[in-house]
Image (spheres, rainbow, N blue to C red):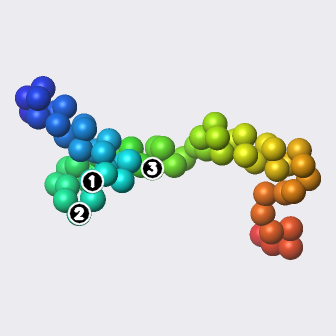
Amino acid sequence: MAAGEQADRNKRIADALKGKVDTTQMSEDECALWLDAFTEKMARPTEIEEAFYTRRRQLGQGVGDPDETW
């Protein structure tokens, strides 16, 4: 794959991660790469999410249903 094609594909995947491109408009290869990137992105909380839940814990507000048992 040429460098220009690779850059275009990377941009489409990045745009799909941002919700700017629908994954139904992507090739199978692009969808597979998108899924890998999406899974990686969702595997860890963002700094904003960490700060949100840290603040809730500090305020004693919890982070979920206190009656929920696992």
State the mark number for residue 65: none
17 lies left or right of 42: left
Whole-percent x and y of residue 7?
Answer: 19, 31
Q: Nearer the viewer, mark 3 or mark 1?
A: 1
Quadrant of the rendered image containing residue 37: top left
Q: What element carries label 3?
A: helix
Q: Can residue 47 be seen in this view?
A: yes
Q: Nearer the viewer, mark 1 or mark 2?
A: 1
Is the Cβ of the residue at disc 3 closer than 8 Å to that at disc 1? no
Whole-percent x and y of residue 60?
Answer: 91, 53
Relative height, residue 2 to residue 35 (above, below): above
State the mark number for residue 39: 3
Which amino acid does the dot numbered 3 rest on? Thr
Q: Residue shown at 11%/29% (left/top)?
A: 4
Which amino acid does the dot numbered 1 rest on? Val
Q: Name the residue under label 2.
A: 24
Q: Is residue 35 visible?
A: no
Q: Which residue lies furthest to the left in this view?
A: 2
Which amino acid does the dot numbered 2 rest on? Thr
Q: Earlier in the sequence, mark 3 or mark 1?
A: 1
Whole-percent x and y of residue 3?
Answer: 12, 26
2 lies left or right of 42: left
Is the Cβ of the residue at disc 1 closer than 8 Å to that at disc 2? no
> Is 57 in front, or is 70?
57
Q: Earlier in the sequence, mark 3 or mark 2?
A: 2
Q: What element carries label 2?
A: helix
Q: Name the residue under label 1.
A: 21
Query: How far is the residue under mark 3 from the one under mark 2?
Result: 17 Å
